[in-house]
Image (tube, helix red, strand yellow):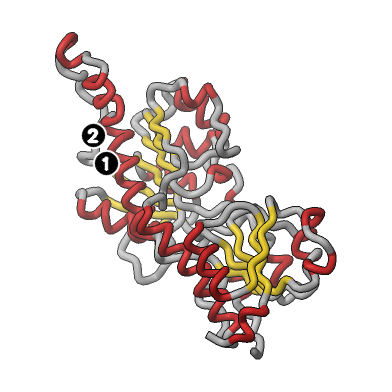
Amino acid sequence: MTDARHDVTILVPGRLHEHAANRIDKSFRIVRIERADAGLIDAETAGTVRGMAAMTGINAAFIDALPKLEIIANFGVGYDAVDAKHAGARGIMVTNTPDVLTEEVADTALGLLINTVRELPKAEQWLRQGRWEKDGHYPLSQATLRGRRAGIFGMGRIGLAIARRLEAFGLSIAYHNRRKVEELPYAYHPTLIGLAEAVDTLISVAPGTASTDKAVNAAVLKALGPDGVFINIGRGSTVDQDALIDALKNGVIRAAGLDVFADEPRVPQALIDLPNASLLPHVGSASVHTRRAMADLVVDNLISWFSGKGPVTPVAETAHIPPRPI
């Protein structure tokens, strides 16, 4: 650790994992503000900020308010809340936290799929409410994983980890990406609706981008069919939420399991009321172990950058930016 690094100011807007904040405080000069609002930081301090650690939205205006900013270390593999394109145009590095959460999110996806198909949360409530003793066995689940055909929308790191788990469960696997991954043995579908037509279990791991906005729409859900199960572990913005509610209400698909929503943490009451929806409060990577690993990667990116070694995990929009000299 060089003494010079203690003179580097790292801005933390809003909340941040405390392990990350503590490590930043030991390695740099940390400045914390309530939210990503340029009005909350005076011009003198703003002029000293060279790095940022964030788990909140960072827009172009906030980036432009920090004239000496060099790097934004985003907490999370998804970075759609950060204007990475604008940052890249200004020569500002953006990093995220891939890999360290891959297995945890894949575990959650499989757990959510099983909960949705076999109704395990509802069965647990049956027991807790005393209905097993009073009313007898919980009704047989209408669906099963046996014989299901899975389609993955977004075959990246997490999609691959989900596919490995699905193979162990004996499910066939197909996928849709922007482009085919040549080395994969799974069937590739060049369109999402084509994938939905070929499977009865659609798992979305797609990032939230302009091209994926409401990609899972009424037509895709209709193609999935009346025995269809939809699981979303990616981003809520990739789904037309109103169309999904209608599809679940009207038997267009059988069931859905959701860990992400269009306007978190606000979940429509119409969705909450549906008996064929299994809902989680965005807990895909939410274990102590994995969140600490993500926090470490946020700080490791900052330390590597300000040591002149470049970022550990740059995002695509800023991967072209060279390391800065110390």
Disc 1: CA contacts within 10 A as few (<14), some (14-19) or many (>=20): some
Q: Which three-letter amino acid code belongs to the residue tagged 2?
A: Thr
Q: Nearer the viewer, residue 283 or 234?
A: 283
Q: In the rendered image of this protein, does residue 306 appear above or below residue 174? A: below
Whether residue 243 is visible here, answered yes or no, is yes
Query: Camera-side residue: 3 or 186?
Result: 3
Q: Going 51% across and 31% down the picture, which residue do you hit?
A: 244
Question: Is 287 left, or right, of 172 in this rendering?
Answer: right
Quickly name the residue at label 1: 148
The residue located at (30%, 64%) in the rendering is 185
Dot 2: few (<14), some (14–19), or many (≥20) neighbours within 10 Å? Answer: few
Percent coordinates x, y for residue 250 in the rendering: 46, 20
Q: CA distance from mark 2 to mark 1?
A: 8 Å
Give the image quarter of residue 215.
top right
**Among the 4 quarters of the image, the one containing residue 24:** bottom right
Mark closer to the observer (2, 1): 2
In the image, residue 80 sits, relative to residue 2, either above or below, namely above
Asked if the residues shown at circle 2 and circle 1 are in contact, with their CB atoms under 8 angstroms apart, the answer is yes
- For numbered disc 1, what is the local secondary structure? loop
Q: Is residue 211 visible?
A: no
Up/down of 307 relative to 207, above or below: below
Residue at coordinates 73% horizontally, 66% vertically from top-left?
86
Q: Residue furthest top?
A: 134
Q: Is residue 278 left or right of residue 220?
A: left
Amino acid at pointer 1 = Arg
* Residue 138 image point, x, y percent: 20, 19
Residue matched to label 2:
144
As helix, strand or loop, the secondary structure at mark 2 comes to: loop
